[in-house]
Amino acid sequence: MSERLLKIEVLRYDPEQDSEPHFQSYEVPCQNDWAILDGLNYIKENLDTTLAFRWSCHMMVCGSCGMMVNGEPVLTCKTFVRDLPDKVRIEPLENFPIERDLVVVLDDVMEKLQRAKPYIIRKDPPPEGKEHIQPRSALYKFKQYTMCVNCMCCYAACPQYALDKEFIGPAVLALAHRYNIDSRDQGKSERLDILADHDGVWNCSFVGACSEVCPKSVDPAAALQQMKLDGAKAYWLQKLPGGKS
Amino acid sequence: MEHIHADVVIVGAGGAGLRAAIAIAEADPSLEIALISKVYPMRSHTCAAEGGAAGVKGADDSLELHFNDTVGGGDWLCDQDVVEYFVSQAPRELVQLEHWGCPWSREDDGSVAVRPFGGMKKKRTWYAADKSGFHILHTLFQTSLQFPSIKRYDEYFALELLHKDGKCRGVVAMEMRSGRFFAYHAPAVIMATGGGGQVFPFTTNGAVKTGDGMGMAYRAGVPLKDMEFVQYHPTGLPGTGILLTEGCRGEGGILVNKNGYRYLQDYGMGPETPIGKPELKTMELGPRDRLSQAFWHEQKKGNTVETPWGDCVLLDMRHLGEKKINERLPLVRELASSYVGHDPVTDPVPVRPVIHFMMGGIDCNLNGETPMPGLFAIGEAACSGLHGANRLGSNSLTDLLVSGKRSADRATAYAREAGRSEPCSSVNQQAEDAVAFVRGLLQRSGGGETTAGIRREMRTTLEEGAGIYRDEDGTRATCEKVAELRARFDGIEVNDKSNVFNTDLQQVLELRNLLDVAESVAEASLERRESRGAHQRLDYVERDDENFLKHSLAYRRPDGRPRIEWLDVTITRSQPGVRDYSGGKDK
């Protein structure tokens, strides 16, 4: 297995000691089949135990290890040394406050997640003692939106979220859409208010950066587009005689 | 120190902890639930489970068949009352998940699909492609967001249990963001902290799997049960240890050695079945313990393939075709291509056995009740006796749900009856002691030991003395080594003195739990002088029902190695017999 010496520059910040973030460099002997996360762990185990970053599964499903690598928001377990130049710069995800080093504060998105009501809402009880019948065609309609690992890379890439932290943002909107179009759900109207208002879908400027950076190939931009159409339709339906308001 | 009062504290927000939280919130919205987790719920390791969750589904299947497969798969070390309850509740829990929105894969008629799995006589593994655990976890997490009585404490690291007069009274935790300490006072505590696969060097288990709940319970005097039974999954990617699901073989993948020979037929799992037509409960669909042991023998015989990451066998899925692989095993394709550069559509993939699951854990019964009143345990952290000496694939995801629900019901009743406890100086003192231990760690200097160094030595010795095959001398040496490492633990220096997200400190605290787990695994492996399921001794090659149809219980001793006691297995209707994985063709 071939080895390559990488110069890894890491953004460091400890709010107890530092007035502002600064870079620290490490020379790391990396195996070519490593993910850059392995490089960070090499630093942690051998060079500097004080470096703070989140990670767990090392297999692209837990979503913990989203960071900026050479300016791009990525999962570091899915970003391979073989694809990187000799000098690598690692920073915490853009658009989030830094908690410590590469660890960002996620409170905002976690709170927004709750507001989107990402769970099945039923008016009728579900079938007694057995599953809903859901044809594959119905499953495939929403399936891609269930793949989100909440790594927050899309928020780091989103130009609208960068400007306006009130914007609900790509992953949460895509998740709301996932439930809206699930054949088992009857709660679309309950999600309308939070999604159709100023901070919801209407704020998206359709750059599509969210879909481009998603490490799980989810397409939040498509979800947003569809929701805008749905939202407009619902708005005008409400204006018709017999409408909701 | 801040004090928080709740009715039930749940430690761990993976599949089991979330299922329990939802059950309590549904049963009694007036009960306050504190859900503490060292990571955000969706980071919990449930997300990494791929293959699926077992529960009787088909008209040709029955609870009895699921029971028989589980008890035989567990080499008759299962507590059969637990298995009976488990198989009876499994379908209900899996349907419940469907109602909550889990994106299960579907049959042509739109009903939930089931796939074959190792050691199972019928197709009964519910799956969501090859991300079943991921979808179960996210479904539970998202569902939990509608219950206001579930108060989450994300990224709080639990340190120790609080107890008085033998009864559980709560838990102490540290907020990672601030380094502040919190004492949670509650009559009922549910441990849902997962297993401790990180005690081994090569594991499918994520970094979070450090046996924290096992360590806390063990230090509080609760025994760890059946810790010698550690499951190797037969198909891990070499190098990283990343799991390739048993679903690969369920869908028809085959295992071959360097000669292209399907070697499993030489280890009691033959005769060979036609390629691409997997038959249940034989060959590649044998149980995990047998498959992993067969690898060991092939390696000894020189039949394995040399790779840059060590010896491997080959998992060949090419005959499944691209369409089926993309539909049923997309994650497997991505993982194998990315991490070892072999696309299963065009290449056989090198694999080797990898530490995957602990059958053992915190001693508890069918209700999750531990010997300490008020303390419950569920999921992989627990050992109710469900899995016996070898867990069948896809029984553990279901167990998260069944044990989570059951113990939640019991904890609800217990908390209501016991009521909130009055402030108590001795409990507060315990909390202060736990905090003093952490502060002491931060002040240490000059000991010369490192977390990474001791962890590495621990992992090496565990693999040497408590791996796929064990013997008296090797295991004894491991016991002694772990005792030495425990003594050297006191020499670890924490370089990071910050109160904010101090992962240097967290890793030392995790290592303490890992050493407790390591000690119990090694000592129980030494004392069980027979071979059963995942515990194989080169010096005691037969199963010995006369002396060892018993659970081991490891009790911690503050100074010196643990005490091992034995507990009878509950047998209701299946007497120990022969595990037959010939597919019925030998008869």
Image (spheres, coloured by chain):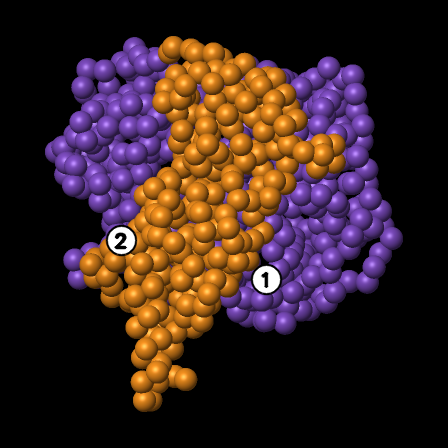
Chain colours: A orange, B purple
Which residue position holds label 2? B105
Residue B369 in the image: x percent, y percent?
60, 54
- Given residues B229 and B578, the one toward you in this image is B229
Q: On the rendered structure, is B327 left or right of A45?
A: left
Quadrant occupied by the N terminus of chain A: top left
Mark identifier at residue B491: none
Please name the residue shown 66% across and 29% down the image.
B504
Q: Amino acid at mark 2?
A: Ser
- Which amino acid, by three-letter code, is at mark 1? Ile
To which quarter of the image does residue A245 belong?
bottom left
Which residue is more in the foreground, A41 or B76?
A41
Report, in whole angstroms, how far the alpha carbon at label 1 lies from the one at label 2. Answer: 30 Å
Q: Is residue A134 above or below residue B133?
A: below
- The location of residue B206, given as percent across then percent down, is 49, 35
Element carrying mark 2? loop
User: How many neighbours does mark 2 have within 10 angstroms: few (below 14), some (14-19), or many (20 or more)?
Assistant: many
* Label drawn at residue B150: 1
Name the residue at 48% across, 34% down: A68
| Percent x, y of residue B407 | 55, 58
Residue B402 appears in the rendering: no
Circle 2 chain: B
Image coords of residue B61 (percent x, y)? 25, 56
